[in-house]
Amino acid sequence: MVPAGGPGAKKSILERLNSGEVVVGDGSFLITLEKRGYVKAGLWTPEAVVEHPNAVHQLHMEFLRAGSNVMQTFTFSANEENMESKWEDVNATACDLAREVASKGDALVAGGICQTSIYKHSKDEARVKKLFRLQLEVFARKNVDFLIAEYFEHAEEAVWAVEVLKESGKPVAATMCIGPEGDECNLTPGECAVKLVKAGASIIGVNCRFGPTTSLKTIKLMKEGLQAAGLKAHLMVQSLGFHTPDCGKGGFLDLPEYPFGLEPRVATRWDIQKYAREAYNLGVRYIGGCCGFEPYHIRAIAEELAPERGFWPPASDKHGSWGSGLNMHTKPWIRARATREYWENLLPASGRPFCPSMSKPDI
Ligand SMILES: [Zn+2]
């Protein structure tokens, strides 16, 4: 794989977005590596980057082959508060792994930070900002291409994160893990969006906690909030790979299936093609995923938006648009499934006779 635009030519994140290009993000790391046996559910800290670098490298590679333009450092919760002395090694190694894979294709490296427990317990701005600044120092030393503040449930803490990340002079994206009901302090998605842009984020949106349909509803509210305030920013969505129409304000964490029984909720690749198209139509140009969003889901985004991007990802060599590979099947009823109409209208069964289609959140 060589970067589009010639050898060594990689456009920055803002050059891409400012020119109207679609940027395809990456997907699930924690939930996926937990299933593969490299991460423990609970604290979800990414020691895997030092304990099993090959596993993290392989997952980055799968996202790159699926069409991702961004290799996000696997540094979720990897701050001094959660990891003590290990945090620095984990952040530095995560940057190296992301860069190694990004250099094999047309992808950028984004350093990622997320919300802290200190904020929840003390709301101590100086301490929270110090934690962010320590991670940022590693990202700056490793010269990541841009920065992402993600998974914030309080706009105030997300604003602090943006303020710290802006100190680097690199472009900053900020996404919150909120739904249409807004943040934990009852700010609406529109109000959150305005705060993030005023703090200096060039790209804003949502990640995690909610499925594709709900995430797009939240993005629409953010967009309307920015419009009403006369502000502009690029929009970014990285939804769950799970359907969550029954979630309350806290998102999938409150569902009884979280985190070990979510499989029946996994979106199909066709669901994700629909999500990619709807996001695009809404004006979102940075489209990726979060927990449960596997490499084949990223490929579905890349395939749906191939006409706009002008190319297919390498992983599509083994796929074929809308089931076209089934054309060669010996059984005629399977050959008949090689159409867009078939997969677009399929109502997949769960195979579980006594399961409800929705659950009741614990809170
Ligand atoms: Zn997530």
Image: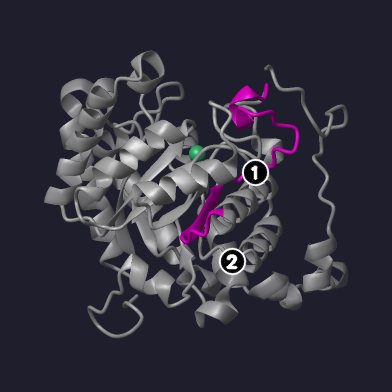
Q: Amino acid at mark 1?
A: Gly
Instruction: Examine the rendering and report whether any part of residue 330 can be seen.
Output: no
Work out which residue is located at the far top of the displayed protein and give it: 121
Here the colouring is one colour
The numbered mark at residue 283 is 2
Q: State the predominant SS element of the stretch in magenta.
A: loop
Q: Which residue is mark 1?
A: 211
Asked if residue 164 is positioned above or below residue 354 in the image, the reply reads below
Secondary structure under badge 2? Answer: loop
- Whether label 1 lies within 8 Å of ligand 1 gets the answer no
Which quadrant of the figure contains the C terminus? top right
Q: Crowding at label 2, few (<14), some or many (≥20) Cα neighbours within 10 Å?
A: some
Which residue is drawn at the image coordinates 15% and 23% (left, top)?
Answer: 85
Q: Are marks 2 and 1 in contact (CB under 8 Å)?
A: no
Residue 107 x %, y %: 34, 66
Query: Which residue range is magenta in the image?
Result: 229-256
Secondary structure under badge 1? Answer: loop
